[in-house]
Amino acid sequence: ALKMPSTLRAAFHISAFSWYTFIVNYLAAKDGEELPAGIFVYGGPWKYLTFLNLLLQMTFFGLAAVNDLQPGEKAESALNRWKDLLFSVFAFPVGTFVVVLFWTIFAYDRELVYPANIDAFFPPWINHAMHTLVLPVLLGEVLVQPHTYPQMRHALAALSVVGVAYLSWIVWVYLTVGVWVYPLLGHFSAAGLLGFFFFNMVVVTLLYLLGDRLNSQIWRKNKAE
């Protein structure tokens, strides 16, 4: 298998960055509009993992595009290392997690995660932009270039810190305004909430391992050829 030409890779990264920038701006602009009760109350879109994930993807693809446009040897650059770290530990596992968890809950009962009254404010394409397209774009990234993965324990430590920070944030929002970021969370006891959180962390960890496996399988095969 041939490595993707650098111009195509750069085009992919710039396109993805532009797309995410557009979506993030679209959603941020909605903050001032008349939205369903409670949707952007306190913290605006910043309390939704979906929105934070879009920012994460935008940042990653922005870094990747800048890295592509750097002259000279990229493999050893600090920017390249940060880019790989961001992709391997956060962009791939968190992005994939958002897609998997959202559609799993949506299929069970959409009112728990994306109530029907939101459809009047967010057309179906924006739902798919937030919750579907993320995955094929990430899989595209896996295919366009190899990524250096960090040591497992470092990756899991970083994921855990971010996970706990996000959990603390949504609990803080609840304690401040009495509204759960996702209606689903209101159905749990405190112990249930912790259990749900740990379950999700396990899923994210498995997705991290999946990304690592995909990366090594695809690019080891390429090297062999």
Image: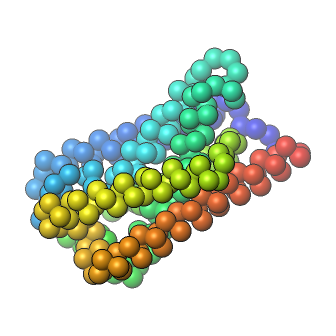
Taking the view exactly as shown, the residue that stands out farthest to the right is 224
Return the residue nearer the eye: 128 or 149. 149
Residue drawn at the location 58% of the way across and 23% of the way down: 69
Comparing 184 with 224, the one in front is: 184
Give coordinates of residue 159: x percent, y percent: 50, 54
Task: Please state the horizontal and vertical placement of residue 19, each as a whole percent of the image.
Answer: 42, 42
Q: Which of 50 and 81 is in front in this view?
A: 81
Which residue: 68% across, 42% down?
148
Q: Along the horizontal axis of the image, is 185 left or right of 80?
A: left
Q: In which quarter of the image is the C terminus?
A: top right
- Residue 2: tell me if it is visible: yes
Left or right, 47 with respect to 148, comes to left
Q: How is the image coloured?
A: rainbow
| Residue 136 visible in the snapshot | no
In which quarter of the view is residue 184 placed?
bottom left
* In the rendered image, the vertical position of residue 202 relative to residue 64, given as above or below: below
Return the x and y of residue 208 as percentages of the image width and height: 59, 58
Residue 77 % position (x, y): 63, 25
Q: In this view, does 169 lie above or below 101?
A: above
